[in-house]
Amino acid sequence: MQSALDAIAQGVNLQGLSYWAATDNWEWASGFTIQFGLIRVDADSQKRTIKKSLSYYAKCISENKLIKPD
C-alpha cells in the first residue's frame, strides 16, 4: 500500500487497487516459504489466521480510499 500512497503523492491518478491473494498459497518456485496473503495458512495443519493486513485492507475498502497504515 505504501507504493500506492507514494504514487498518489507524486501525482499519479490512481483509480483502483486489488490484492494478489487472499490466503498464503503454494508458489511453484518457492513452495510455502513466501507468505503474502491476507490470511496466513499453516502448511502443516492448514489452520488459517487473519493477518493485520486484512484488517487494514478492510478499512481501506469500507472507507473507499487508501489510508496511511498505523
Image (spheres, rainbow, N blue to C red):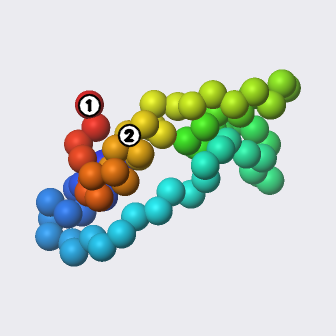
Question: Which quarter of the picture shows residue 47?
Answer: top right
Residue 43 appears left or right of 63: right
Q: Which disc, if any, is residue 54?
A: none
Q: Is residue 5 above or below residue 59?
A: below
Q: Residues within 10 Å of mark 2 (few under 14, many from 20)?
A: some
Q: Residue at x 34, y 51 (%)?
A: 62
Q: Residue at x 41, y 45 (%)?
A: 58
Check the image and report above or below for 63 versus 47. Answer: below
Say what secondary structure mark 2 lies in: helix
The picture places residue 20, in percent across and down from the top left corner, at 56, 57
Closer to the N terminus: mark 1 or mark 2? 2
Q: In the depicted view, which residue is nearer to us: 13 or 67?
A: 67
Q: Residue at x 36, y 69 (%)?
A: 16
Q: Position of residue 32 (x, y in %)?
A: 75, 38
Q: In this rendering, would 49 be left or right of 19?
A: right
Mark 1: secondary structure: loop
Image coordinates for residue 55, horizontal then vertical, percent: 43, 37
Q: Nearer the viewer, residue 56 or 63?
A: 63
Q: Quadrant of residue 43?
A: top right
The residue that mark 1 highlights is 70
Q: Amino acid at mark 1?
A: Asp
Dot 1 and dot 2 residues touching (CB under 8 Å): yes
Q: In terms of image quadrants, where is residue 50?
A: top right
Up/down of 64 relative to 31, above or below: below
Q: CA distance from mark 1 to mark 2?
A: 9 Å
**Which residue is under mark 2?**
56
Asked whether residue 30 appears in the rendered view, the answer is no
Q: Quadrant of the C terminus?
A: top left
